[in-house]
Amino acid sequence: MASFRGQCTLNVTHSKLGTGSEGFYHDVRILPGMPIHLPHGRTGAVCLTLDFDAVSLWLGTFGLKTPAYLSRGEYGARVGVPRLLSLLDKYQIKTTWFVPGHTVDTYPELVRDISRRGHEIAHHGYCHENPAALKEEEESGVLLKGITSIQAVTGQRPVGYRSPAWDVSDNTIKLLRSHDFKYDSSLMADDYTPYRCRIGDKPFTDRAFEFGEETDIIEFPVSWSLDDWPQFEYAFWAPSVWPGLRQASAVLENWEADFEYMLENLSPGVFVLTMHPQVIGRGHRMKMLEKLIRSMVSRPEVCFTRLADLAQSWKD
């Protein structure tokens, strides 16, 4: 059994670390440059995030309904999720799962099992819609529908949101505030440092860009380079082709280098990795992921946490 020393559950007063079934507490501190709490002696947080899209990705984003494409999403639920849960249990790591309401409604017992194991269930649209293509009332309706699905299955209202396809509309952050979300994880203005989302940006082309007003929505930034989809997944979507199918060893080298760069150059830093059960669940990629986890848990200055816990620990 792997050591549990790297797992942390954070809040504004304490952080509980566990070894086996017994827990113990460490003092926490607010680290300079980023108002979040990490356990004493930890300067880096790793947030493994899973986008459990299942078939909604192919139905919503790609608009495909043929059995072959949908079977790729089914693989994520049928094979990828159980493999990931087994690996995460082995290392006693708690993670954040962004789950469309369509997936929740299609696989309620599986989503309930993920939640019961202590993983966070966060919002990821209903049927993997691009919010930038929706009117404000349509986008609000999608948010409400996804909230209803998640709450019905887990008994908890989601506090985090990730946009399908990592695009947002001019209304998204405003709507997240109105629906009591605490954080977003869709934007890319930083890499290892969370920041406040803005509303009211004015992207002029004939004069300087005007930055809007900061909000209370926390952004945990993402990157396509730290996402398994463009690295691995082959997809033909006329007229485009996503080649994917990179060697897992090459992707591991990149992800480890990004992780090492954070530890060497930022204190504190938050490393957010995005994965999809239908992508990372393949055998050789699971072996690669376990190598990465082993490398991370060997670093005493690092802890694993859910995004909701980091958001809760934020204190201006």
Image (tube, rainbow, N blue to C red):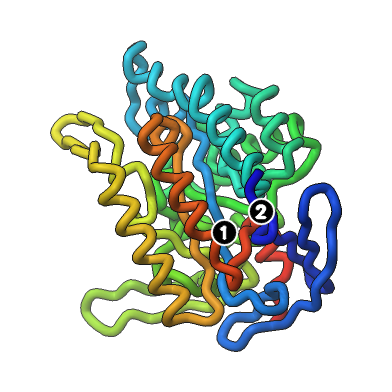
On the question of residue 122 being in view, the answer is no
**Mark number, residue 297:** 1
Identify the residue at horizontal 34%, vertical 52% (top origin): 252
| Residue appearing at x 36%, y 34% in the figure | 284
Spot the residue most to the top.
Answer: 67
Q: Is residue 261 left or right of residue 159?
A: left
Q: Is residue 289 above or below residue 168?
A: above
Residue drawn at 17 percent across, 30 percent down: 238
Answer whether labels 2 and 1 touch (C-beta < 8 Å).
yes
**Quadrant of the image for the C terminus?**
bottom right
- Point out residue 151 in the picture as x, y percentages from the top left corner: 75, 37
Instruction: Give how far apart the Cα atoms at labels 2 and 1 are.
Output: 8 Å
Q: Point out the residue furthest to the front here.
A: 1
The amino acid beneath tag 2 is Ser
Label 2, residues with CA under 10 Å away: few <14, some 14-19, many ≥20: some
| In the image, residue 227 above or below residue 220 | above
Q: Position of residue 31 (x, y in %)?
A: 64, 84
The amino acid marked with disc number 1 is Val
Q: Which residue is mark 2?
A: 3
